[in-house]
Structures are given as structure tokens and as C-alpha cells.
Amino acid sequence: MSDQPRRAGARRPHKPYRRPRRDPARIAAFEALRAVDERDAYANLVLPPLLRKAKEDNEGFDDRDAAFATELVYGTLRRQGTYDAVIAACVDRPLREVDPPVLDVLSLGAHQLLGTRIPGHAAVSATVELARCVLGDGRAKFVNAVLRRIAAHDLDEWLERIAPPYDKDPEEHLGLVHSHPRWVVSALWDALGGGRAGIEELLEADNSRPEVTLVARPGRATTDELLTERDAEPGRWSPFAVRLADGGDPGNVPAVAEGRAGVQDEGSQLVALALANAPLTGPDARWLDGCAGPGGKAALLAALAAERGAALIASERQPHRARLVERALAGAPGRHQVVTADGTRPAWRPATFDRVLVDVPCTGLGALRRRPEARWRRRPEDLEGFAPLQRALLLQALRAVRPGGVVGYATCSPHLAETQAVVRDVLREQPAEWIDARPLLPGVPELGEGPDIQLWPHLHGTDAMYLALLRRPLDT
């Protein structure tokens, strides 16, 4: 080799083109994020088939790879607001001008750099390889440059840079630190009733990975049977609940595969139990689940009704969701029927039922652990769209129950506009007795001042389910 210095203008030897290395886990995570962005899909629905395809197409793709892809998707979605602010500080254009697929790759890289223990150089290298596979070499160079800027600081240092001090703007500070939209922080804070410690605990709980909770459907399965599963633990509050502490695949549990047990958050189980145990005057033979899809509460209610000789009608307006209810109720004991009907335009006569549950459509702010994309998808104006439907469903439920019977109004949102405000508004039009629901959940702490119940992820380990129990007066 010559010792002479390279002549000015001489060309460097051309490097042969190297094909990018395909990482099936990262590619599956990217495709899931694209589906969430492009089609408003839910990660919990689109990711499983992507992982199954990755296993079919890639020899050696195992459970660890699937778990890694899952962490990439959910971790990125949960922290999206924080990562967007970090990325915005590292690019020379408004974030809206960055192509969405590029932004998804950058977000995946930001999560690996700031939210995992992957070494920085490995996170950058692997994400650039992903960019080469799914974006091309040109845009991969942009990804590389941005990720190297992100890697210059850890998460705490970035939060100091992008978040205003708490005492200057507490809602914006909490929103960026805990990755929630400002309006969601404000709504949750109002529902909690103030205090910094509580809201921080709640926001952090929203960012935690939820346990998989099973329900042993009475008469068909027992908790003892479910507790034989690996790493299974008893539920905290529901006598029918079992938690899979390792987050295992519930589809591998025989009782779940056979429909004798199901996947159901413990808060959802408690709502059904409280309605079933609420005191009423008169017969207890006809129950209605007025918003039954996808069928978890209906299956539990059907089993509880069967133990008393009662019959359940499960009503669902959407035909495809009604089919899910039928599947959940297949093989259930006792008398039950699934009908496709609009609860605001009842297909039954007034004063027909002894117990009625309406778990109404809502913003879903109580299930942000399970559906983290919802926090970015929802807008404050969505409340205006849900409000008339929620009031109409509760009003018709009170008319469907007989005098002396009980209605349960439930929603998976703690937003006051979807909980207490709805109940108070409807009671002005259709008077009923607001029953204290707290004694119906013995052993469950911190249920509030009553008479309604608000569950919380940080206090109870459940979704933030709300329940109000209303008894129709005998003289109506």
C-alpha cells in the first residue's frame, strides 16, 4: 500500500451495497403502529395476527421476540406525547411535516433509547436498519441523524428540557412527564378531586403494563382450576378473578379456550357483581344487559342469573358485536337470549325487567393502560357526541326496569361529564333512588364518598370503572 497521501479529489473506493438486515420483531412493531395511525386500529387487535405471521414467516421467531415487539408497540404508544416532544426538539421542521411512517420509526427508536435498557448504539443501529427496510436508504440517513441527537440525553434530561416547571404550568408539566394530553390530565385531576400525589400515581399507572385477568364463569369453571396455571394468582377483589402475573397468553388456558372462563378486567367483574347483589323489592327473574357487546359482563351476568333461576336478555345494537356476545354466551347455563336492538329505542315493553345494566359507550379514558392509543385519538369534543347517547340509554334503562327494580349505569371513564353529570341529569327527568353501591363490594377500599363507585388503576389495579345503582320507586 502506498504511503503517499490521497490526492485531492481522488475518489474513495466504492463500498458494495449491503442489504438491510430484517428484524421481524421490529418490523411487526412498525406495521402495528402504521395500522394504528392509518386505520385508527387498536393495537390489541392488529398486533396478535402480525405476530402470528412473523412466527410463520421467520424460523426462530419465538415468544421472546413476540414479547419484545409487544413492548415496542405499547411502550411507544403510551409515551407517544413525550417522544413527539423530544423528536420535535431534534428536527428542523414542524412535526406535522415529517412523513408519518418516518415518525413511527423515530418513535420506535426513541422508545428504545429512552424507555428500555437497550444500549444506545444498538438501539440506533437496529432502528436505522429498520428504516432501511421499510423506508429506504435515503430516509434512513435522516432517521440516523435524529436518533443520534436523541441519544445525546437520557429521559430525565430530556424532560427537564421539554417540560415546563410544575409550579409554572402543572397540567402541561404532568402531561409531558407522564405522556397524557393536557385535557386528559385536567379531566382525571378533576375526577380525583385534586392533589399532586394522586394524579401522578394515576398517570403513572396508566403507563404500566396491565396484568391479564381471567374470570371463572360460575357453574362452568372455578378459580381453583384457573390457579393451576403457571404464575396464576387470585384476584384482589372479585371472587371469580384470577390474575396471570407473567402476562401469559390466555388463549393457552383450556378453560378460556373452551369458553368456560374469559378475559375480563376485575373492575368489569365488580360492576356485574354489584348489580347482581343490589337489593330490590319484588321478583328477581328477568335481567337485561342493555349494552352487551362484546359480551364479558353478559357472560358473567348470565351465570349469576342462572344460579337464581333468572333469565338474561343481552341486547347489542351493532350486529358484529352481537355476534361476539353470542359467542361469549355459548354454552352458558340457564336461560338467555341475545337480541340486536338499540337501547335508546327499546325492543321491549316498559317495566319489563328486575335488573338492568347499561355499560354505555364512552371515551374509554378508564382503560388507557390497555388501549394507550385512545389517549391520543380522543378529543374533548368527543364528550359532546357521547353525552346524548349516554343519557338516552340510562333514561330508557330506568323505564325498562319495573318499580322496585334496579338499574346499573356503568362506564369505563372517570370523566365527570360521563359519570355523575349523566346520572344527575337523567334523575331530573326520571326520578329514582340512588343506592349506595359501596357495601356491595365488601373489602374493596377507597371507593369514595358514595353513593356511586369509582375504581382506579392506581388504587385498585383495575380499569377506572364507574358504577351508579338506581332503584325505580314503587309508586312509578
Image (spheres, rainbow, N blue to C red):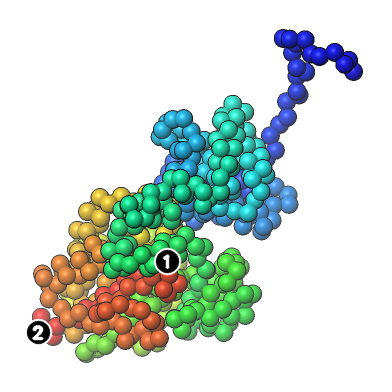
Tell me the amino acid under the disc marked 2. Asp
For this rendering, which residue is in front, 414 or 150?
A: 150
- Quarter of the image with the C terminus in it: bottom left
Residue placed under numbered mark 2 in the picture: 475
Residue type highlighted by circle 1: Glu
Sequence-wise first label, 2 or 1: 1
Whether residue 140 is visible here, answered yes or no, is: yes
Element type where label 1 sits in the image? helix
Q: Indicate the position of residue 447 as horizontal and vertical percent values.
A: 33, 78
Image point (50%, 47%), residue name:
158
Alpha-carbon span between mark 2 and mark 1: 45 Å
Label 2: few (<14), some or many (≥20) within 10 Å? few
Q: Nearer the viewer, residue 90 or 224?
A: 90
**Residue indicated by mark 1:** 201
The total of numbered circles placed on residues is 2
Quarter placement of the N terminus: top right
Q: Which mark is residue 30?
A: none
Mark 2 or 1: in front is 1
**Furthest residue in direction right, as rendered:** 1
Left or right of 461 on screen, residue 291: left
Viewer can see residue 286: no
In the depicted structure, whether residue 199 falls above or below residue 220: above
Task: Choose top left, top right, bottom left or bottom right for residue 245.
Answer: bottom right
Which element type, helix, strand or loop, lies under badge 2? loop
Q: Position of residue 146 (x, y in %)?
A: 55, 35
Residue 344 in the image, given as x and y percentages of width and height = 21, 63
